[in-house]
C-alpha cells in the first residue's frame, strides 16, 4: 500500500529505526513498535485490511482507534516524502561590481585570492581564516569573488558562479565557501562529499571526535580548552565527511563569544592579542582562535567513531553518559548538509552503526577535558 512512500533505506541502531526517504533526503528516527506498524502499513494492500489487522490480530482497540492509526501513518509518510521548496532563480553575473578588497591566504602550499565587495561582506568570511592571511601574492591557485546585487549575495570561484543566497541566509554562503575551499585544499569534488556537519571536531593522532550542541551550549569554548590541553583541532562548526567515511580538516579558527573571553585568557597563548570583531553578521563580540596545536605530521583526515552532545550548565553535576542515536540526530541533522545521493545515504547509515554516542553535561571544565581524553584514547 502506497509503496512509493516507503523509505529507501532502513537501519536498526540501538533499538531505534532510522528511515531515509529519497524524495525529501530526510532522516527520521522511530521506535521499534512504530516501525512495526509502518512496515505493516506498507505491506498491506488496502486500508480495510490494515485496520482489520490492527483491530483483530494486534488487538489495538476499536475501529475508530485503528482508523486513527491508519490516518496518522498516512500523514507521516506523506510529510516525510515532501521535498523542500528551493530557490531556483537564475542569476546573471557576467558583470561583477567593483570589488575593492583583495586578500591572499595560504593553506600549506596552496594560495587563494578572495575579492570582497565591501568590508561588511568581508566580515562574513575573513575573520575565520584571518590567521592564514599573507601579503599580496603574484600567483595564486584559486580565486573567489564575494559580492552583493540587490538582496542576494553571490560567490564566484575562478570567475564562475557557484552560488547565490538571500542576504539574510548569509550562513549558506559561508557554508558553500567552506565547501569550495575544502575542495581546493584537499583536491576533492563536490560530488564525493557525504556530508558537511555543523559540528566541532577534535582529535588525537589516530581518531577524531565530533562535538555537537545547540548554540550557546559551550561547544566552541570546550573545543578551545581541549586544544589547549593537547587535542588537535580538525574543524570548528564546519566538519566535512568524504566518501572514505573520514572527517577532513577545515582550517577555520574557533569562534569564541565574549562570555568565554575571561576563561580562555589563562589557557590560550596570546588570547588577549587576538582581534575582537564587533560588527560581524552575528552582532556579538567574537574572537577567533586558530589551531596552534596541530599534531606534527598529522593526517589531513581521520576516522570518527564518537559523537558527543555537549551542554554546559553551571547548575548541574558534570557527567558523561551514553545517549540515544535519536537525541544525536535531532541535533546533528537539521543544521548539517547530507548528500541526497542514495549511495551516500547508505554510507552515512553504515557509519552511524559504528559510532558511539554520548552526552556531556558539564559545569567542571577539567572533568570535561579528562572525560573526553579518556574516551578518545580508549
Image (spheres, helix red, strand yellow):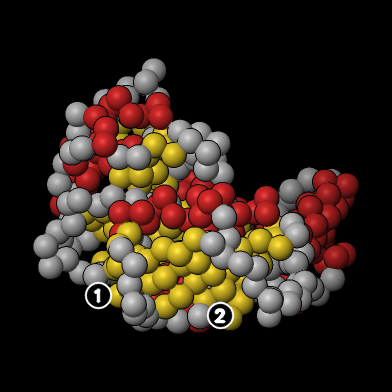
Figure check: 89 above or below 263: below
Figure check: 70 above or below 262: below
* Left or right placement of residue 163 versus residue 108 in this view: right
Please give the residue where the numbered disc 1 appears in the rendered image: 109
Q: How many marks?
A: 2
- Quadrant in which residue 39 is drawn: bottom right
Residue 63 x, y percent position in the rendering:
87, 50
- Quadrant in which residue 221 is drawn: top left
Q: Earlier in the sequence, mark 2 or mark 1?
A: 1
Q: Quadrant of the N terminus?
A: bottom right
Q: Measuring 20% from the left and 69% from the top, which residue is drawn there?
A: 299
Does the rendering let one see residue 146? no
Residue 303 x, y percent position in the rendering:
28, 66
Q: Name, please, the residue furthest toward the top.
A: 315
* Left or right placement of residue 61 versus residue 136 in this view: right
Crowding at dot 2, Cα within 10 Å, few <14 / some 14-19 / many 20+, comes out as: some
Front-most of 122 and 12? 122
Q: Measuring 51% from the left and 80% from the top, which residue is drawn there?
A: 158
Q: Measuring 30% from the left and 45% from the top, which residue is drawn there?
A: 289
Q: What label does residue 175 carry, if any?
A: none
Say what secondary structure mark 2 lies in: loop
Q: CA distance from mark 2 to mark 1?
A: 22 Å
Would you say the residues marked 2 and 1 are in contact, meaning their CB atoms lie under 8 Å apart? no
Does the rendering let one see residue 99? yes
Crowding at dot 1, Cα within 10 Å, few <14 / some 14-19 / many 20+, comes out as: few
* Left or right placement of residue 80 versus residue 177 in this view: right
Residue 145 x, y percent position in the rendering:
54, 69
Q: What label does residue 159 carry, if any?
A: 2
Front-most of 162 and 221? 162
Amino acid at each position: 500500500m502506497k509503496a512509493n512512500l516507503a523509505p529507501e533505506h532502513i537501519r536498526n541502531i540501538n533499538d531505534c529505526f532510522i528511515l531515509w526517504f529519497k524524495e525529501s533526503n530526510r532522516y527520521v528516527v522511530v521506535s521499534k513498535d512504530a516501525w512495526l506498524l509502518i512496515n505493516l502499513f506498507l505491506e498491506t494492500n488496502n486500508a480495510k485490511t490494515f485496520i482489520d489487522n490492527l483491530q483483530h490480530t494486534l488487538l489495538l482497540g476499536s475501529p475508530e482507534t485503528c482508523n486513527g492509526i491508519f490516518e496518522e501513518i498516512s500523514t507521516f509518510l506523506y510529510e516525510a516524502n515532501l521535498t523542500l521548496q528551493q530557490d531556483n532563480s537564475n542569476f546573471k553575473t557576467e558583470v561583477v561590481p567593483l570589488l575593492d578588497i583583495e586578500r591572499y591566504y595560504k593553506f600549506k602550499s596552496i594560495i587563494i585570492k578572495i575579492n570582497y565587495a565591501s568590508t561588511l561582506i568581508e566580515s562574513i568570511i575573513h575573520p575565520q581564516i584571518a590567521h592564514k592571511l599573507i601579503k599580496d601574492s603574484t600567483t595564486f591557485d584559486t580565486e573567489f569573488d564575494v559580492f552583493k546585487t540587490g538582496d542576494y549575495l553571490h560567490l564566484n570561484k575562478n570567475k564562475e558562479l557557484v552560488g547565490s543566497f538571500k542576504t539574510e541566509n548569509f550562513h549558506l554562503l559561508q557554508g558553500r565557501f567552506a565547501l569550495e575551499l575544502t575542495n581546493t585544499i584537499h583536491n576533492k569534488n563536490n560530488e564525493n562529499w557525504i556530508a558537511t556537519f555543523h559540528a566541532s571536531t577534535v582529535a588525537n593522532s589516530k581518531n577524531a571526535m565530533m562535538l555537537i550542541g545547540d548554540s550557546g551550549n559551550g561547544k566552541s569554548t570546550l573545543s578551545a580548552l581541549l586544544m589547549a590541553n593537547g587535542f588537535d583541532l580538525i574543524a570548528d562548526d564546519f566538519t566535512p565527511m568524504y566518501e572514505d567515511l573520514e572527517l577532513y580538516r577545515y582550517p577555520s579558527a574557533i569562534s569564541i563569544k565574549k562570555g568565554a573571553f575571561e576563561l580562555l585568557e589563562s589557557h590560550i597563548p596570546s588570547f588577549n592579542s587576538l582581534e575582537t570583531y564587533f560588527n560581524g553578521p552575528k552582532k556579538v563580540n567574537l574572537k577567533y582562535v586558530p589551531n596552534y596545536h596541530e599534531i606534527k605530521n598529522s593526517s589531513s583526515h581521520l576516522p570518527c567513531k564518537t559523537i558527543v552532545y555537549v551542554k554546559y550548565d553551571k547548575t548541574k553535576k558534570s557527567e558523561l553518559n551514553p545517549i540515544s542515536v535519536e537525541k544525536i540526530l535531532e541535533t546533528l541533522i537539521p543544521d548539517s548538509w547530507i548528500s541526497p545521493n542514495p549511495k551516500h545515504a547508505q554510507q552515512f547509515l553504515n557509519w552511524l552503526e559504528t559510532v558511539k554516542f554520548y552526552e556531556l553535561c558539564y559545569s567542571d571544565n577539567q572533568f570535561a577535558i579528562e572525560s573526553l581524553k579518556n574516551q578518545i584514547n580508549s
